[in-house]
Amino acid sequence: MAAVTVESSQKRKASAMGTMAVVEADDGEEVVPYSLIDKLQESGINAADLKKLKDAGFNTSQSVAFAMRKELLSIKGLSDQKVDKIIEAARKSSEIGFVTCTQLVSKMKSRFQIATGAGKLDQMLGGGVESCSITEIFGEFRCGKTQLCHSLSVVAQLPSSMGGANGKVVYIDTEGTFRPERIRQIAEAKGVSPSDAMDNIVYARCYTSDHLEQLLVEAAGLMVNDEDRFALLVVDSIMGGFRVDYSGRGELADRQQKLARVMNKLQKVSEEFNVAVVLSNQVMADPGGGCAFMPSYPKPVGGHILAHFSTTRVMLRKGRGEQRVAKIYDSPCLPESESIFEIYNGGVRNGGD
């Protein structure tokens, strides 16, 4: 990973950005939250079968343990007996069984939060965008969704002392709104090397929902094979391709099934590699939703599938000038509240700063 150089007065706060794992063991050695699929060879799985699994996008024991049996059977050259043996070996090498609540709390200590750049917004989010979870940001155009994604992409690379996670970023762009010059602006404002900040963002332009599925498989491969760890995966926006690929009520069921598969993959990636997943989302008008005394806010698209998979949902709306209002729309642990932030050259900051 290219070292993010922190300049001026911030230089004392930053540590050199090198290869850094999610959890640090007591002896100082770095521990990753997954086990490579090659370890299954110790359980009697031959190298040829492991290569077939890798070619199909299964790079870790966890990815095999999380997979449906029929999905593994669809891989050419794997028989019923081989699949059963592979699943058994993967489950034994992965911690996917029951644990006590105390053990769960200990396990969750490896999770981290990425600051947005706006202190009050971070406070509303309980510290920032959390790893091992999906954060959905939705709102009308010009609400600041893409600006937040750009800001998070730079902050994620910073040391934890500066609200970052010392990690690289995967950025999937379905709308063509990613701007490297914006990354440069934000990096310069935060006193880090713009070229290093851009080197640490792996970008892909996505055109269809099928392409998105394939890119997520490739992203998981990157997270395994890259020498450095990843901290953030951004999809801007999640429904961009789906709204074009499927039209009308006749294709709604197919669209939602495909969306469920994509969201399930995102959820697995977030937990398997301990990364924060941030999705921006489009909205639709609700003409019958308001009345004379109450405003009608646009509704997020994606239906119940997207709502159930997203851990935290944040609604954005326009404020005065460059100010935007963020509201906790749904969360398993955060109270409903609002925060005002504004967009500036350095990303986002508290409203009025």
Image (cartoon, rainbow, N blue to C red):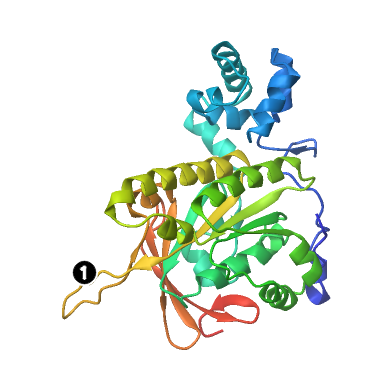
Percent position of residue 217, x then y = 61, 43
User: What's the residue at 80%, 45% (across, down)?
Assistant: 227
| Quadrant position of residue 317 | bottom left
Q: In this view, does 283 lie above or below 64?
A: below
Percent position of residue 183, x then y = 69, 72
User: What's the residue at 64%, 28% (across, down)?
Assistant: 61
Q: In this view, does 235 lie above or below 37?
A: below
User: What's the residue at 20%, 73% (across, down)?
Assistant: 290
Asked whether 68 or 15 is in front, the reply is: 68
Q: In this view, does 190 lie above or below 138?
A: below
* Callout 1 crowding tier (Cα within 10 Å): few <14, some 14–19, many ≥20: few
Residue furthest left in the image: 292
Quickly name the residue at label 1.
Answer: 289
Q: Confirm whether residue 283 shows in the render.
A: yes
User: What's the residue at 61%, 49% (across, down)?
Assistant: 215
Along the horizontal axis of the image, is 249 left or right of 169?
left
Asked whether 251 or 166 is in front, the reply is: 251
Asked whether 11 or 225 is in front, the reply is: 225
Q: In which quarter of the image is the N terminus?
A: bottom right
Percent position of residue 302, x then y = 37, 55
Residue furthest bottom in the image: 321
Secondary structure beneath dot 1 equals loop
Along the horizontal axis of the image, is 198 left or right of 116?
right
Q: Confirm whether residue 59 shows in the render.
A: no
Along the horizontal axis of the image, is 284 left or right of 157?
left
Q: Is residue 40 above or below residue 244?
A: above
Percent position of residue 211, x then y = 56, 51
| Quadrant position of residue 84 | top right
Residue type at mark 1: give it: Gly
Give the mark count: 1
Q: Quadrant of the C terminus?
A: bottom right
